[in-house]
Image (cartoon, coloured by chain):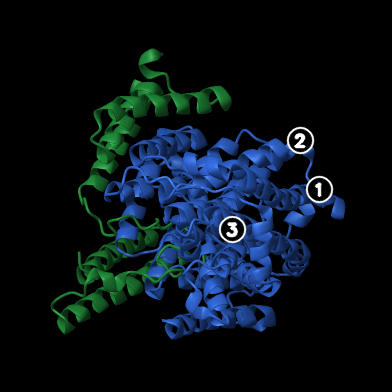
Chain colours: A blue, B green
Amino acid sequence: MLSDLILDPALLPYLAGGVLLGIIVGAIPGLTATLAIALLLPLTFGLTPERAIVVMTGIFTGGIYGGSIAAITLRIPGTPASAMTMLDGHAMAMQGRAGRALGLATVSSCIGGVFGGVVLVLFAPQLARVALRFQSPEMFALVVLALAAVATVSTESLIRGLVATVLGLMLATVGIDRLMPVPRFTFGSVNLLVGVPLIPVVIGLFAVAELFHQAGRRGRDRQPAPDLTRVRISDIWTDMRAVGFGTVLKSSTIGTLVGTLPGAGASMAAFLSYSEAKRSSAHPERFGTGIPEGVVAPEAANNAMTGGAFIPLLAFGIPGDPVTAVILGGLLVHGITPGPQLFGESADLIGPLFAAYFASYLLILVFGLALIPVFVRITNIPRPVLFPLIGSLAIVAAFTSEGTTFAMYLTVAVGTGAYLMRRFGYPLIPLLLGLILGPMLESNFRRSLILSEGDPLIFVRSPVALALFVAAVALPLWILRAERRAA
Amino acid sequence: MSRLNDDVLSGGVLLLVAVGYGIVALGIPAGDGEPGPSFMPLLLSVALAGLSAVIVVAGLRRSAAAPVAAPAAAAAPAPGTSAEPDTAIAPDDGTETDLPKRPWLAALATVVFVALFQPLGFAVSTAVYCAAVTRLFSTDRRMLVTVPVAVTGALFVFFRLVLGVRLPPGLFG
């Protein structure tokens, strides 16, 4: 088992490429790991599943880490997740300690990431063993819980979250019915018989909508370059010791737990962990003035989140955050169905995934400490260069994914719809989760009722299903109450 | 645009979507006995209709209570609970939409790009599209030439030479 955690050296170039791409894209203000994977998914088609998994893992961990670079040096969070890191990280940079802040972010990201990975390796196989015993009613209840959680956490308005979920579920009903040979919502189009293709939707949601959104904003073409001082390991060590192992452990735990919750991603992990570090601190008033805790807490948490987010993905086939939702799409394209069967059917892929995960943090540590000035320079791309690149890459990638003009039009249509949804305050992540989990929801629902010959009580007869349904109602209420109290 | 109009407008559009989707769903064979292929779509149609009605009613009620709509700042999400945790964009200098027509120009350019992609081929259509998008973000004349050439070249190297994807040759075919 432990030998599975050592990465096959032949996979190392793929992982390093993924991590570097992730860091660069994550560090460019406005581009997220979700967008990076969405755009790069079609490019993994030519790879073996094993290599594709390794590349995607690298982009994920690198992308989450990369966000901290622009947050600290440019005072623009590279990703929303690093908005909390910006507070103290940029304050440190203003005091001439940019290098130290970046070093701290790198080290705490790695500790958090490895912590999340350990939890992943220990718990995912156990949970999968439990999930294998799930029948249709339990699986249905689990998907309901996941959709309820994502609708709640992705926006302040539960109603708007639910609308987005339903829209995603509606998209999922397009195509030939899974239990009976009846076409639904295909309007005679051959392209829609197998359903709405996932990759064009993902690219539309995250890349094309982003382009339209950015076109409507004014922005500075170029950011002022930060001054970088050389990082000394001993300084980072001093700062880490001052912060204390307790804070690192607590932040990593919060991050991992948030990761396991479907839909809740790196931003929430960083936000909760920063708030908790501040609340429990002996000197909360110094948060925001450039103290190491303010960098360590959110960075440890949002990187621990990556490990946590893989847990429900591998154990149940339910992604734990937006990036793993897109990764799930990528796995499906490669013919891999994440879920409890994965540990049996495709067990040979689990080892490389775990190995790539841990190795990616080792690479982040090396790249982060050695190449920071290079990343800072590369990531400062002017908007008039960046957005033509994103737009044309999105459309060509959509073409590559299906080889049809239809896929390109679908991408633009989804992008326009997604742009409007954002503009009117509707979240996009529940829509993606609805589209991905829709078939699982519907087929388990109908299979249950076929088993029970139409008796709806089958859903409450199983104690596990009942508990999951109760959680699906209680969890949103609990989150909403906690948010109201925090506000 | 005020939140009030947003609610009534978006809720109204969603209601239409729910009705249209529901009408198509009614035409799907129900299957016999157990919930068939039309069951879930009908359920979703009703759910969306209900949710969008709530949004419309909330919007109308707010307009009755406060004729002057709340400032947009009130709707700005708190950090960590932003409307779009991992897709939202980093705050720029202007947080509201400054240039309301630009997104539609970008959308139009993208549709034209897709329409011309096969007939004109990858190189020409991509370069023209890049020039159009660059124009939306910059008035610098040099960029109108350098960006399309650089981006088209980079994509060609990446897709054609590295990945071996067949791109439509169009005019060069």
Query: To which chain does the residue with label 1 belong?
Result: A
- In front: mark 2 or mark 3? 3
Q: Nearer the viewer, residue B52 or A386?
A: A386
Label 1 crowding class (10 Å Cα cut-off): few <14, some 14-19, many 20+? some
Element carrying mark 1: loop
| Residue B126 visible in the current orientation | yes
- Of the residues under marks 3 and 1, which one precedes in the sequence? 1
On screen, residue A261 versus residue A73, left or right, reads: right
| Residue A458 visible in the current orientation | no
Q: Are marks 2 and 3 on the same chain?
A: yes
Distance between mark 3 and mark 1 Cα atoms: 25 Å
Q: Residue at x 64, y 61 (%)?
A: A108
Q: Quadrant of residue A247?
A: bottom right
Q: Quadrant of the C terminus of chain A?
A: bottom left
Identity of the residue furthest to the left in this view:
B67
Q: Which mark is residue A105?
A: 3
- Image x and y of residue B111, in percent: 30, 37
Q: Nearer the viewer, residue B37 or A166?
A: A166
Q: Residue at x 37, y 24 (%)?
A: B149
- Image x and y of residue B4, in percent: 21, 72
Query: To which chain does the residue with label 3 belong?
Result: A
Element carrying mark 2: helix
Residue pointed to by mark 1 = A6
Label 2 crowding class (10 Å Cα cut-off): few <14, some 14-19, many 20+? few
Q: Nearer the viewer, residue A115 or A265?
A: A115
Q: Give amino acid for label 2.
A: Ala
Element carrying mark 3: helix
On screen, residue A170 versus residue A436, left or right, reads: left
